[in-house]
Image (cartoon, grey):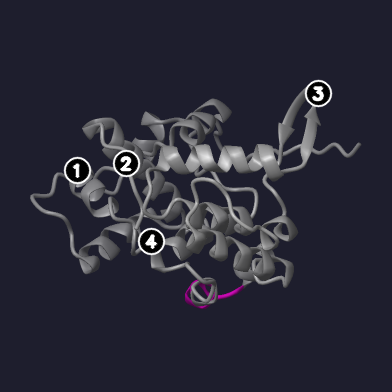
Amino acid sequence: MTRFELVPRGPFSLAASAAFLEGFAPAAHRGGERGHLQDRWPGLRPVGFFSPYEAAAWALMVQRIRIVQAARIKDRIRADLGQAVDVHGDMRHAFPGPARLADLGGYPGLTSRKVAYLRWLGEAAMAGRLDAARLRALPREQALALLKELPGVGDFSAELILLRGVGDPDHLPGHEPLLRRAVALAYGLEGQPDQARLTELAEAWRPYRTWVVLLLRVLLEETTGEIRGTRS
């Protein structure tokens, strides 16, 4: 058995991160004061997928259906097709590997188009096109362009894979539909900022723009009660 220890730099709360993962929730930022949001949600950090491959599979499954529905389908796929893992006596199932998806003939709850997308994804992953280290080493725009070559992956999905699958810590997403509403709420703006204004405000969030975007989304959801419903 291989054992390893992860030591975070700075405050980290496993409970806060687990709550985000289980509830699909996020938070906000006020007036350029990134520390204000960190104080409000201490230890909450971006929660990533195990790999760009699994992030891409989620991005494809969640399109045009409710997130809770997609989560149930993903859980069933894990149980039906994934490898069983014994975690100190607790049997869990890992998400199925690329070879299993590449051979997927169909699955309840998924359209034939989504099944085809997942098959292509499995083939792409086996060919090394979703290697995390390779994608991290590329300029962001080039990495996004490569991800959008995958069938079914558009602008939003490519950014999701880059942020939560590759683990880019300092990317300002341009296709997150709720981000501008969250920024308007956090900064007390009368209207939603345009792209130029959003980019200007986000300069104060470097080098952790991904982290601040998470906090902004949490603020919006906690303040308005709104949660992400569907993805087109």
Residue at image coords 47%, 67%? 153
Residue at image coords 66%, 57%? 104
Mark 1 vs mark 2, CA separation in Å: 9 Å
Amino acid at circle 4: Pro
Residue 9 seen from this side = no
Element assignment for label 2: loop
Element assignment for label 4: loop
Mark 1 or mark 3, whichever is nearer to me:
3
Mark 4 or mark 3, whichever is nearer to me:
3
Q: Is residue 179 left or right of residue 63?
A: left
> Which mark is first along the chain, 3 or 4?
3
Q: Quadrant of residue 67?
A: top left
Residue under pointer 1: 185
Residue under pointer 3: 88
Residue 117 seen from this side = yes
Residue 87 pos. (x, y %):
78, 28
Find the magenta span and give its range. 138-144
Q: Is residue 187 left or right of residue 9?
A: left
Task: Give the camera-side residue of 2 and 40.
Answer: 2
Amino acid at circle 1: Leu
Mark 2 vs mark 3, CA separation in Å: 37 Å
Amino acid at circle 3: His
How packed mark 2 is, by other alpha carbons closer than 10 Å (few <14, some 14-19, many 20 or more), is: many
Callout 2–callout 4 Cβ contact below 8 Å: no
Residue 49 pos. (x, y %):
59, 48
Residue under pointer 4: 173
Callout 1–callout 3 Cβ contact below 8 Å: no
